[in-house]
Amino acid sequence: MDDFGISLNRPQEKGERLNRAFLVLGVSADLLIIAFSLLAAFLFRFGLRSAAPLTSLTGTWVFYSLATLLLSDMETVYYARTSVNRSMHAFRMIRISLIVTLAYVLTVFLFRIPPAYFLHSRLVIALVLGIWAVLAVLIRVLFMPHFVAWLVRMRLLKTPRIRILACGDQSVQASIRAALDTSPFYRILIETVPCEGSQCPADPGDRLEKYLERMAACGCDDLCIADDDLDFDSISRFVITCHEKGIAVSIFSKLFEGIGYFDTWLSFADRPAVVFFTPPMSRSAERLWRAVDLVLGAVMVLALAPLLFLISLLVKSTSPGPVLFKQKRVGLGEKPFTFLKFRSMTSDVSGNVKAHKAYFEQYVKGVAADDDGTTFKKRDGGRVTPVGRILRKASLDELPQLMSVVRGTMSLVGPRPCIPYEMQYYKDWQLYRFTVKPGLTGIWQVYGRSRLPFDAAQFLDLCYALKRSIGLNTRLLLKTMPVIMLGKGGY
C-alpha cells in the first residue's frame, strides 16, 4: 500500500499514475481551450445573431481537437516531466497551434469542404490561433503544474510519493534534482535518495546490478543513473530487467550523444538522457495502430499505383531479371515471411548474398556502415543498376513492402526485418526486437540510418520495442519523409 492507501503491484505504476492524471488534465484543458477559442472568435466575428450553422463550429472543433491530440501525443506534451522545462513546453504548444491551423487551412482549401461543416472565415481562424496560443501557454504551461501541486496537497489527486535512487555522478545528480525542483508538483512527489554504501564494481554490468540491489534495500521505486562509462550491452540487458520488473529508469550518459535519440525534456547539453517510463502498448492501441496500418497502407498502394507501375517498367526494361526481389526475412516472434523490394541489383543473387554476408560480419564487429572503403553498399557498386541506384537513394525500392503492411506481416513503423543468416550474430538482448512487427521505417532509420554502429542501431530498436506508442509511431512516420528526401544514408 502507498501513502494514500493505494495498492500498487509494480514500482513503475506510481509514475504511470501521475502521468495518467497529467494526461487527463492536459487533454481536458486542450479540448476546453480550443472550444473557448473557437466560440470567442466566432462570436467576435458574427455576433450572437449569426446565421452561420452551428455544424460548422462543431466540425471545426472536432478537426482542431483530433489534430491537437495527435500532435500533442507525438510531441510528448502530455507527460508530467514537461513541467521541468516550461520554455520548451511553451514552444511546443505554440508550434502545435500553428501546425494544426495550417493543416486546417490546407484541408479546407484542397478538399473544398462546404461552410456547412467547417468555418471558412479567415478572421475567425486568425483569432482562434492567437487566443489558443496565449491560453495554451497560460493554462497548460504556467497554471496546470501549480494546479496539480494543489490537487496533491489537498489529497484530491491520489498520486503516491515516488522515491528515486540517484546513482553515479553526483554532480549530474545535483543538476537533475535542481531541474526536478523547478516543477511545483515534483518538489512534493519526488524524493531522490543518493546511492551510498560499498564501492561500486568496475564492470558496467555488475555496477548496474549493484544499483538495483541498493534500490531494493533503500525501498526506492525508480532509478536515475548518471554514468559515462556504460556500454550498450550492459545498458540494454539492464533496462530489459527493469522493464520486466516494472521499474522506471532514466540513464544520463555521454554514450547517447552519437545516437541522436534522447529525451529532450530531461536531457542536459552535456548529458543526454534516455528514459524508460512508458508502459507497454495497450491492446486497444495495438488494434488502433493495426487499423492505421491497414487503411494507410491500402490508400498508399492505390495512390502510388501509377508510380509503382512506372518503376516496374523501368526496372524490367533496363536490366534482365524479375521486377521484384523476394527474400525470406525474420519477423514478429522470429517467424519468417516473404520480403519484397523492387530489384535494384543484377540478378546474380549468389554474389549479392556473399558480399552482404561479408559486409554484415564486419558491421557487427563495429565498423559503421558509412565508413569509407568497407561498406557493402560501396563494394557492391558494380552490381547496382543505374535505375536501382536512383531507387535506393530515394528509398523507392522499399515501396512493395506496403503489401506486407496490408497483409499484416509488417507495420508502417518498426525495426527493419533481418535476414535469417544475420541472426547468428545477434546477442540475447538484441532478440527483443522480434517482440514487435518489423516496419517499413524505424527508429534508427530516422535518427541514425546506416551511419550507426551495429550495437547502437540495435539499442535504438530495443528503445522502440520498449517505448512503442501511437505517438512515437506517428513521429517516426512524419520524420521519415524529410530523411528520405535528403537522401540521408539508405536502408
Image (cartoon, helix red, strand yellow):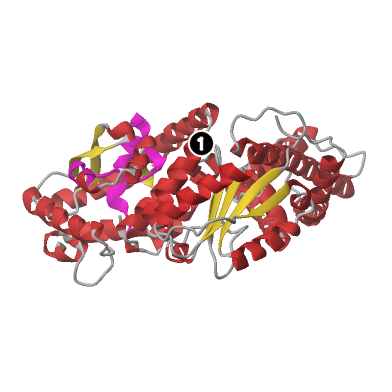
Q: Which kind of residue does numbered mark 1 sit on?
A: Lys
Residue that extends furthest to the bottom in the rendered view of this protein: 372
Helix, strand or loop at label 1? It is helix
Q: Is residue 443 visible?
A: no
User: Does 147 sit left or right of 250 as displayed?
Assistant: right
User: Does 320 sit left or right of 7 as displayed?
Assistant: left
Q: Position of residue 378 (x, y in %)?
A: 19, 66
Location of residue 456 (image quadrant): bottom left
User: Does 251 sit left or right of 353 as displayed?
Assistant: right
**Residue at position x 86%, y 46% from top?**
40
Residue 433 or 386: which is nearer the viewer? 433
Judging by the rendered image, the residue that carries numbered circle 1 is 245
Residue 135 or 141: which is nearer the viewer? 141
In the image, the segment drawn in magenta is 394-423
Query: Number of numbered discs present?
Result: 1
Q: Is residue 149 visible?
A: yes
Q: Position of residue 342 (x, y in %)?
A: 23, 47
Residue 401 inside the magenta-drawn segment: yes
Quadrant where the image shows the C terminus = bottom left
**Residue at position x 59%, y 55% from top?**
195
Residue 252 or 33: which is nearer the viewer? 252
User: Does 341 sit left or right of 43 as displayed?
Assistant: left
Count neighbours of disc 1 (C-alpha within 10 A) and say few if under 14, some if 14 to 19, many if 20 or more. few
Residue that extends furthest to the right in the rendered view of this protein: 48
Is 441 situated above or below 283?
Answer: below
Q: Position of residue 175 (x, y in %)?
A: 66, 65
Residue 124 or 188: which is nearer the viewer? 188
